[in-house]
Image (cartoon, rainbow, N blue to C red):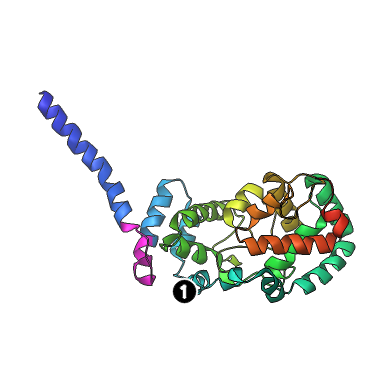
Amino acid sequence: MTSRILATATLFALATLAPFGTIAKAAQCGNGPGGYEAWKAEFAREASGKGIGQTAVAALMQTHYASATIAADRGQRSFGLSLDQFLAKRGASTIVARGRALKQSHAALFASIEQRYGVPPGPLIAIWGMETGFGSQRGHQNMLSSIATLAYDCRRPEFFTDQLYAALKLIDRGVLSGATRGSMHGEVGQTQFMPKNILAYGTGNLDVAANALNSTANFLKAHGWRAGAGYQPGEPNFAAIEAWNAAGVYQKAIAIMGRQIDGEGRASAAR
């Protein structure tokens, strides 16, 4: 009797584990479009099992393999430039000049942001200009296709799988849709938020500049920004800029442009 019970339990365990083995095999990452459709279908089933709603799953099933996203992901050469080259390529002088004007014309907005989050205008404006040219270049790629492709791709599947689940949750909530457009890696809005950061720090429609700037300040504060402290390399708030973007040349560029927009004394205030 005991052996029969043990055999039954073993068969039950194998039957229980079998679907997960199938998912693991079917949802393997790939390095080209060939396996994307099968991966997508299996991921959709897995997402449904984790509580993702029908609207978001249907949107996922409409995605396509984004070859342009893969090409962009493999060709991020600007982050390998020297700081001076990077500043020139990204139009730093233009960002600073326009940034100073925007700081004046939107003084009330930036004052309210600084009062709430402790973040001065300079770094926010520098990020805004660097990311989208102050909202003029937000990208035209299908956000969900870009992120799903990167979740399928073998280069960074874990990171982008988390982003894909966040995107699906945002679609479920009506914050985003399957038609939302963004940049090559799925970033959206005036300061280019990834889905996980929208869930954690987003404040309203990020295509609206005020919402995007408040959300960016919210992100920086959550990553240790201290009101009144400096944000140049070696100063307390530089770590928050590092959290925003992992590329060292980008981080230094934001600090430099922010200082030029804010003014030397303001950017290096109390440490």
Horizontal side, residue 34 vs residue 94: left or right: left
Please indicate whether residue 79 sits to the left or right of residue 228 in the image: left
| Quarter of the figure with the N terminus | top left
What residue range appears in magenta?
26-39
Q: Any magenta on residue 268? A: no
The residue depicted at 47 percent of the width and 49 percent of the height is: 52
Q: Residue furthest top?
A: 1
| Residue 209 seen by the camera | no
Q: Is residue 69 above or below residue 161?
A: below
Provide residue 206's location: percent of width, then percent of height. Answer: 69, 59
Q: Residue at x 75, y 57 (%)?
A: 213
Amino acid bearing label 1: Ser
Q: Which of 75 and 101 lies nearest the eye of the viewer?
A: 75
Instruction: Residue at 38% x, 66% y: name it.
Output: 36
The quarter of the picture where the C terminus appears is top right
**Front residue (pair 220, 36):** 220
| Percent of width and height locating residue 111 | 86, 52
Q: Which residue is mark 1?
A: 67
Residue at 61 percent across and 61 percent down: it is 247
Let me know if residue 94 appears in the view.
yes
Query: How many marks on residues?
Result: 1
Numbered disc 1: secondary structure: helix
The residue carrying pointer 1 sits among few (fewer than 14), some (14 to 19) or many (20 or more) residues within 10 Å by Cα, namely some
**In this rendering, position of residue 165 left or right of residue 7:** right
Q: Position of residue 77 (x, y in %)?
A: 56, 73
Q: Position of residue 214 (x, y in %)?
A: 75, 53
Q: State yes or no: residue 35 in magenta.
A: yes
Foreground residue, 192 or 119?
119
